[in-house]
Amino acid sequence: MDEYTDLSYIPSEPHNNFQTFNIYKPRNISDEHPLVCFIHGGAWRSEDKLDHVGLARRLASFTGYAVAVPNYRLSPRETTEDNAIHHPDHAKDILRFLEFVVTSVYNSNRLCLMGHSCGAHILSSIFLQPTQGEDPLRPSVELLQSTKAIIMSEGIYDIDLLLSSFPTYRAWFIEAAFGRRSTYEEASVTKMNPRVGYPHLQWLIVHSKGDTLIDEAQSEAMYQHLLRSVPHITRNFGELIEEHNDILKGVQFVKLVGQYILDNVPPCT
């Protein structure tokens, strides 16, 4: 397997590690094969692309596709007016990354995107459209056409619903990522609509029975929302039993999502 590390998707001086990515590519495949992109979680404030090297390698080996894992700017644990990084800044970085790989790095017009925990919220914020106000995360037509599937695991979707189940999360990471608000309805992707004109997109929502950090109510709310508005939505809430992040360390998750990828984004013929 060929591995390329610390590639910049936003050229900057000095080099900014938060805006870099790694790519893991099985040998003897062309750039026209599908590309898998994994967006990590970490409550918008932690984790790094290096935390997911093992997952990326296992996914690349199972599917035979290249797997890219980006970093993005994180919200500081101690937020001030000078250092604050609030939504949608994290998602803006990921949108820049996706636009970069689809136009500059990989020739594939078939992307499969994966988002874990807050990474699921980030992808949803890009590929769903606000019902009112500005749309700062509008993807290009090329990116929308090239993206064939989105897989979301242990995701955060409805922030007010999350806080009703886990009120301590407000001070732990929600205010750092979104600022202090009386309601987070505007930032909840269950209130957003699919982008018009791209019915080909396949959605998979995964939730583990063993997850104690994010409850199944989040995934169920997102599934019911998409069920009413997109033609291709699947869920798997019963197969995995590991804890929130532990699912990423085992083989069962790779088999589940890897087979979904092969079934819905087949290799070039």
Image (cartoon, rainbow, N blue to C red):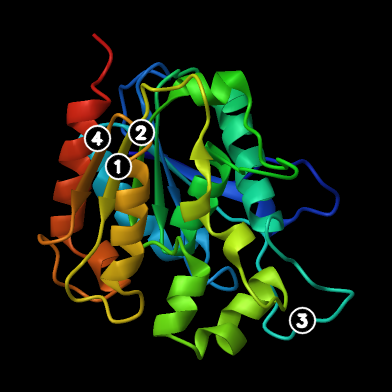
Tell me which label, 2 or 3, sits earlier in the chain. Answer: 3
List the single residue furthest toward the top. Answer: 269
Residues under numbered marks 2 and 1 in contact, where contact means CB atoms less than 8 Å apart: yes
Residue type at tag 4: Ile
**Which label is found at residue 230?**
2
**In this view, 116 is above or below 202:** below
Q: Earlier in the sequence, mark 4 or mark 3?
A: 3
Q: Where does the C terminus fall, quadrant-wise?
A: top left
Position of residue 33 measured from the top left corner of the image (x, y, whole percent) = 35, 21
Whole-number angstrom distance, CA of label 2 to CA of label 4: 18 Å
Residue denoted by label 4: 261
Instruction: Give the alpha-carbon distance from disc 2 to disc 1, as whole Å.
Output: 6 Å
Whether label 2 touches label 3, CB < 8 Å:
no
**Distance (Cα) linking label 2 and label 3:** 37 Å
Crowdedness of circle 2 by 10 Å Cα count: few (<14), some, many (20+)?
some
Seen in the picture, residue 121 relative to 227 is either above or below; the reply is below
Which SS class for mark 3?
A: loop
Q: Earlier in the sequence, mark 1 or mark 3?
A: 3
State the residue at coordinates (45%, 18%): 109
- Give the CA separation, mark 1 to mark 4: 20 Å
Q: Residue 114 or 70: which is nearer the viewer?
A: 114
